[in-house]
Amino acid sequence: MKFLNPQLTQTVKRHPSILRLLTVIVILALAWTLRSQAVKMLPIDYDEDDYLRAGQEYAHLIRTSNWSGFLEANYRPEHPPLAKIVIGVSLLSAPEKPLTPDRPTTAEPDRYLPRDLVRPARTTNAVLGWLTVALVGSVNPLAALALATHTFTIKYVSQIMLEALPALTSFIMVLAYLQFKKSRKTGWLIASAVFLGLTAASKYLYCVIGIAILIDWYLNAKDEEQVNLFFRQAAFWGILGVVIFFAMNPYLWADPLTRLRESVFYHAGYSTSAEEVERANFPFWQQFNWLFVSPKIWHRDLFFYAPDMWIAFLAFIGLGRLWKKERVYVLWLAAAMLFLMVWPTKWPQYVLTLTVPLSFAAAEGLSEIWDQIREWWQNRNSNKAIYKKSEVSRATPWLIPGLTAFIILTVFPLIFQIIVSTTDFNAASIRDGFQGGIWRAFWQGITGQIPIIPSEGGNPNEVGFTGLSTYPFIFDAFNTGYGGGFSYLFFNIMWMVLSVVLQVGLGLGIALLLWQKGVKLGKFWQALFILPWAIPEMIGAMMWLNIFLEDWGWLYLAADKFGPGSIFGKFTSALASSPDLWLIIFLLPALWYGFPFMMLASSTGLKMIPREVYDAASMDGANALQTFRFITAPLLLPLLLPAILVRGIFAFNQFYLFQVFFFPNATLSTFSYNTFNPTGWFGGGQFATSAAINIINVLILVVFVYLFNRWSKAGEGVTHA
């Protein structure tokens, strides 16, 4: 703060709240700038014509003082009217226009909506979204920064959508509840119930946040042994919320039960039969995918930078810390995500139900990283080992061969790839590159002899210097995905987690079965189960391809032979129609290939557990489940963790399986190969881009190993044997 007035600097140091206030003001200015730009630049999107028409109807009723008309007006009655009434109020400042035409939900966006109506309606929603950022900033400025820059949030609170108002009221509902939990004042409980009703009267989906409040409330009451009081207060809270919901929903007054039933059950029918939902065909994990991509793929002129992926990563890191600080936000995040995973409709605007707690988790994740860095810096000299020259001189001859191999086989290739990634080396410049062009471009670039060429994936004939511009280019590809928003990183992480969990479960289960007393031919069964691991992955993948290959695979031939009513016919029909089951085609081969390793690791660990502890447990009357939970699992886990880590790294780098099954962009390894391959994706032959992907892959794995070791304490080794 040297550029500030010295007196002001001293004042800020004495009063940290002033610095916090200034930080929040800057964040709010940024939030409004981004939202106002979005209001001006975003093209007309789906549903905007519907909600503009609904707002026009309410604006006309207000202008003509036709208050009784509110009892019958609710265009698109599947959603409550409050957010649409707010849009109508915003249109009072604009001249009245002919009613926007009624169009089916399958219609393309109406690009010709009058801008003098679109602007005030969008601006009102943007103001509501900005107020949400302001409230978040009053609690945590870092969380406000995340919410202010989250591009999906910016997009859907800056359009004529129904998201901005319930996102605001739901957060106020949580804040009021937290104040009630802290002070036990009934006024805060009433305020929370009022905003629960306002949220329900705006959009039903956001009421899922009430579930998180009830869970946190119950857990707190249980800890304080006040469960009966909880039930009484929760009943009052819910009833008052319902009263406010009906009071703010005049469309229900004339025929409450019929209209409410039609409104609620509309969504169930729409989510399972609407043409646009079936055409989108999103898998159940799509909402997770939306967290790792950005609408920048659709609006590149508006969003110059998209931090959504980083916010999601930081949120994952900060969940544990946020749980300790305020668990209701974690429960909010979990309840919303679980509901969105189950709900068949997977539109991206639904992620706004959880971007507020996501931002709080991201803030805690960033704080966690900062604390780790600061702790490391403070303790950097305290843990240094003391080396004796005599010991070092004796050990050096034995270390030299290993260090030499490590440098040649690991360090040098890594450095070479880093150098290649700073150039535009490609298939067209391969001759120049191998004649010294790579080193020439790198040296001249870092010494300033040649300018930096932005990385755009071109094919120049001579190697040029791109500096670090390839990395933002790759992260942009990660963040925007392909095919309408498919995230490489998310699928890679999801694949690693799912495949490893299944492999550990099956491997441990078989090991426990073979470990039981009285099992005959145990060695034979163990050798039989090891066979999949002995088969090269490429050959194994081709074997499974012969099963699942459409039209020619064994599964489809069996379906043709036994008919569509057979188990084979039903399974192939489900694979063709379900957006979720196709993942089974990949998980089954991965499970078959990976479980033997986990079985061997589990079997080895089980043999190291002393039998005496089981005899003691048996004497104490422990049953099989208690024995596994309190003896086998704790003693086996330290031995199993290194194997889990190894399988996780292999799964993250899964390659042959996806290549054989013609799914070339599943993991970063396949993405890198098909970027490198002259016949692959992105025109192929982009060697520098492939090198950058490899470096990013290595860095991600380093972070993964660090986080896994820190969470599992695998680095501490086995202490019980």
Image (cartoon, helix red, strand yellow):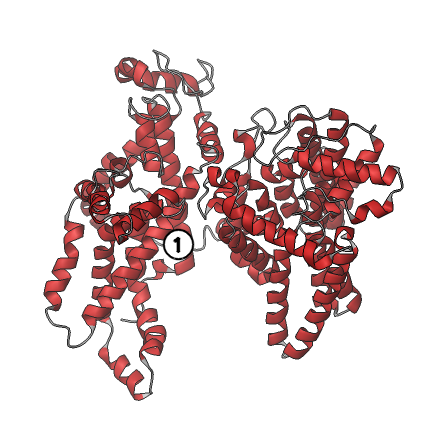
Observer-nearest of 651 and 75:
75
Question: Which image quarter is the C terminus in?
Answer: bottom left
**Local crowd size for mark 1, using a 10 Å CA cut-off: few (<14), some (14–19), many (≥20):** some
Q: Label 1 sits on what residue type? A: Phe
Q: Residue reaching furthest right?
A: 65
Q: What residue sits right under mark 1 in the picture?
A: 708
Residue 363 visible to an observer of this rendering: no
Question: Which image quarter is the N terminus in?
Answer: top right
- The structure residue drawn at horizontal position 75% and vertical position 47%, both measured from the top left corner, is 82
x and y percentages locating residue 530 in the rendered image:
16, 56
x and y percentages locating residue 135 in the rendered image:
72, 49
x and y percentages locating residue 532 in the rendered image:
17, 51
Question: Looking at the picture, does residue 631 appear above or below residue 482?
Answer: below
Observer-nearest of 521 and 348:
348
Q: Is residue 226 left or right of residue 308?
A: right
Q: Is residue 387 left or right of residue 610?
A: right
